[in-house]
């Protein structure tokens, strides 16, 4: 079973996804903004954690130039002088570091944000479309049967705390140019492959906690701007859901999108579990 949560930042998606993963013994998709930022070299030097907001501070051309120089240049002395290359440092880390500190001015079109949004959407879909052997031998097999034990490969079952529509909404808010027709159609098509999509509306509540990056989402200078940023995200997600071809708030067979309108956490959990069990019962018939 493939279960996804969609909604603006802080609307409780991750909390519910973790709860469902444990309750139904399903893996959680680990691909997120932190893991992709880390893969691109945007890491906290102290904790080793990915730092997704650094992509906004990095110049895309500096990032790519650095990668190319380290990858293709045999002139290590030159690279060391220009980029401060440390032989032990992974190439992406040098590139990210140089792109942030290189000094070139960035805005939402010249920063690494478009590259990051693209990679994020791709990595997410790749993880969710990989096929598994029944004995979980290799997560990356692409053939019809397992190389190790010969079993046929199965579609994965999982929970994810965001859909490609969430990725697309953030791309539309931060760097709309990256959303091509192909990007859009792929996001729509992939969203239709979920068995259940749970929409967490902003109106039901928002729990931003004290994470500075989330509280200041969208770079809002004050509370009113930040709240309008989250509102833009919420209405975008509603529109994308309606346009994606998922069956909104439907009890029909196949993909259904269910709105979790309750505010109380216990009520939300009860609603989600009841929907999943009803979907399972339908599919078993
Ligand atoms: Zn196998």
Image (cartoon, rainbow, N blue to C red):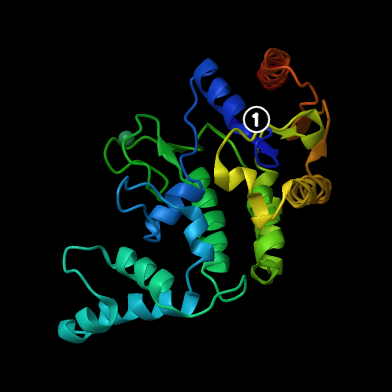
The residue identified by callout 1 is 12
- Ligand 1, what quadrant? top left
Residue 80 drawn above or below residue 4: below
Position of 36 with respect to 237 (left or right) is left
**242 or 147: which is nearer to us?**
242
**89 or 144: which is nearer to us?**
89
Residue 1 in the image: state x and y as whole percent.
58, 29
Which quadrant is home to the C terminus? top right
Visible residue check, residue 3: no
Using the rendered view, name the quadrant where residue 136 is placed.
top left
Residue 97 in the image: state x and y as whole percent.
35, 67
**28 or 250: which is nearer to us?**
28
Residue found 66% across the figure and 48% down from its top: 166
Mark 1 Cα-neighbour bin, 10 Å: few <14, some 14–19, many ≥20: many
**240 or 203: which is nearer to us?**
203
Visible residue check, residue 213: yes
Residue 10 in the image: state x and y as whole percent.
65, 36
Residue 242 drawn above or below residue 249: below
């Amino acid at each position: 079973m493939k279960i996804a949560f969609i909604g603006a930042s802080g609307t409780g998606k991750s909390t519910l996804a973790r709860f469902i993963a444990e309750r139904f013994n399903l893996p959680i998709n680990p691909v997120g903004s932190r893991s992709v930022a880390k893969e691109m070299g945007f890491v906290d030097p102290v904790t080793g954690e990915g730092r997704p907001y650094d992509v906004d501070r990095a110049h895309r051309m500096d990032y790519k130039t650095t990668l190319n120089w380290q990858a293709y240049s045999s002139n290590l002395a030159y690279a060391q002088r220009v980029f401060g290359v440390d032989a032990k440092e992974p190439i992406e880390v040098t590139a990210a570091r140089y792109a942030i500190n290189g000094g070139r001015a960035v805005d939402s079109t010249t920063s690494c944000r478009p590259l990051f949004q693209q990679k994020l959407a791709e990595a997410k879909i790749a993880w969710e479309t990989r096929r598994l052997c029944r004995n979980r031998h290799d997560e990356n097999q692409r053939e019809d049967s397992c190389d190790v034990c010969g079993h046929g490969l199965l579609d994965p079952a999982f929970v994810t705390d965001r859909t490609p529509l969430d990725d697309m909404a953030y791309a539309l808010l931060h760097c709309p140019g990256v959303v091509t027709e192909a990007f859009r159609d792929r996001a729509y098509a992939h969203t239709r492959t979920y068995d259940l999509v749970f929409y967490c509306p902003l109106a039901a509540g928002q729990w931003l906690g004290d994470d500075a990056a989330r509280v200041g989402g969208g770079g809002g200078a004050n509370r009113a701007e930040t709240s309008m940023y989250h509102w833009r995200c919420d209405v975008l997600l509603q529109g994308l859901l309606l346009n994606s071809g998922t069956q909104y708030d439907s009890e029909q067979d196949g993909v259904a999108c269910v709105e979790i309108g309750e505010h109380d956490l216990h009520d939300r959990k009860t609603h989600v579990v009841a929907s999943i069990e009803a979907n399972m019962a339908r599919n078993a018939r």
